[in-house]
Image (cartoon, grey):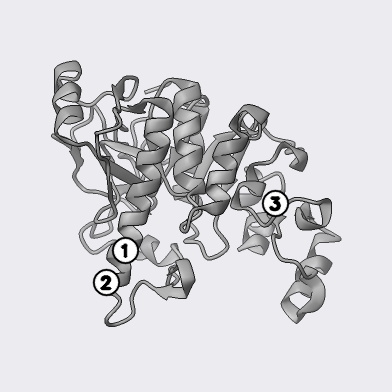
Amino acid sequence: QIKNMLTDRDFSQIVQEVIVVWNGERHVDETGLGKQLVDFGKDHPLRISYPLKAGFPNDLMNRYHPRLQVKTKAIMYYDDDGPFYSYKATLGGFELWKRNANAQIGAMARKLDLGPRAAEESKAVLNGPGDRFFVSQCPTDELDYNYREFANFGARMVLPSGSFLHSDYLCFLWHPVFEEIRQYVRKHPVNPDDGTVSTLVSQLAGRAPRVYPRRINEADDDVSAGGDQNKKEQRHGRRLMDGINWDAKGAHDKKMNWGRLRSDAANSLARYFGSINSGSIGWCYGTQYQKGEYCKPEMASVGMLPWMKGDHTPRDTCP
C-alpha cells in the first residue's frame, strides 16, 4: 500500500510523503519485509518514526504527535491492517476535507447512541441533521457504542483508517492540559485513541466529524453489488484487544465485553467535557440520495458526491 501511494500515477499527485509510526521495541529492518521498506524509503518520500527510541511509551497517540513535523496541512491516517481505499474514494475524502478543514473527516464512522434524557434534549435542539451543536452529558447519562453499523448521519466519532485531520491539531492533541486523557488512553483495555481524537477535535472545532463514502463505484456499476471498485478496498480480519478474533466462532461473549468497554470509554470522555457533538451529516446531505437520515445508496457512485463533478473531479465551489 505504501508503494502504491507513492508510485501510482494518481495517488502520487495528492500524496506528498508517507510516515510510518513504528511503536515496536525492535527495529523495523529486522525482517525481510522491513528491510524492503527501509530500502524503498531511500528513493521515495517515506519516513519511519521510532517513538520508543525517543523515550515515548508504546502509545497509539504517538501517530498524532507534533514531533513528526508533518509537512502538509492535511494528514490521512491508516491503521496498519487497513482497510485501504481506492484513489477515487481517497480523492473524495480529501476534497471534502478541503471544504471542512477544521473538522475531522472519516469514512468509517460510529454512532454513540444517547440515553433517554440526552435524546430528548437533542430532539429539542435539532429538527433534523446538524453537525454544529452539542448535547449535554450528565454523570447519570449513558452512551452506547453502536458497532452494528457504519453511519453516514449521526456519527459522533470516526475510526482512524481513511480519516483526515488538519496538522495544526497535533499540538492540541499533545498539549499538557490533556495529559491525563492520554494516560487514560494508555491504561484503558481498548486504548481508545480513535474516540479520544474525535472527542477532542469536535470539542476544539465546535462540530461533529464529516463523513465520506469509503467506496466509489463507477457510474455503470451495480451499486447494490458494490461494483469492481469495491475490490480495491483491501479487507483484513480485525483483531481486537487480547488477540480476540472478531470473526472467530464462539467469540460473541468477548465481542459483547469489547462493546461494553468501548461504551465505557465513550462515557468517560463525554463526561470529562460534559457534552458530546450532535452527530455527523452524511455525504448525501441535501441531495436526492438523502433518505431521512440515511444515504441511499450507502456507497456513492461517480457523479453522486455534491462536492465533485460528474467525472469525479473537484467542483470549484463548496457544496
- How far separated are the C-alphas under marks 2 and 1? 6 Å
Up-down: is 53 above or below 173? below
Foreground of the two, 202 or 135: 135
| Helix, strand or loop under label 3 | strand
| Helix, strand or loop under label 2 | helix
> On residue 18, which mark appears?
3
Name the kind of residue labelled 1 in the image. Asn
Observer-side mark, 2 or 3, equals 2
Residue shown at 27% from the left, 81% from the top: 250
> Mark 2 and 1 residues: CB-CB less than 8 Å, in contact?
yes
The mark that comes first in sequence, 2 or 3, is: 3
The mark that comes first in sequence, 3 or 1, is: 3
Residue shown at 40% from the left, 46% from the top: 265
For label 1, the residue is 257
Up-down: is 83 above or below 150? below
Name the kind of residue labelled 2 in the image. Asp
For label 2, the residue is 253
| Helix, strand or loop under label 1 | helix
In percent of width and height, residue 299 lies at 29, 50
Name the kind of residue labelled 3 in the image. Val
Relative horizontal placement of residue 55, taking residue 244 as reference (left or right):
right
- Label 1 crowd bin: few (<14), some (14–19), many (20+), radius 10 Å: few
Residue shown at 45% from the left, 25% from the top: 203
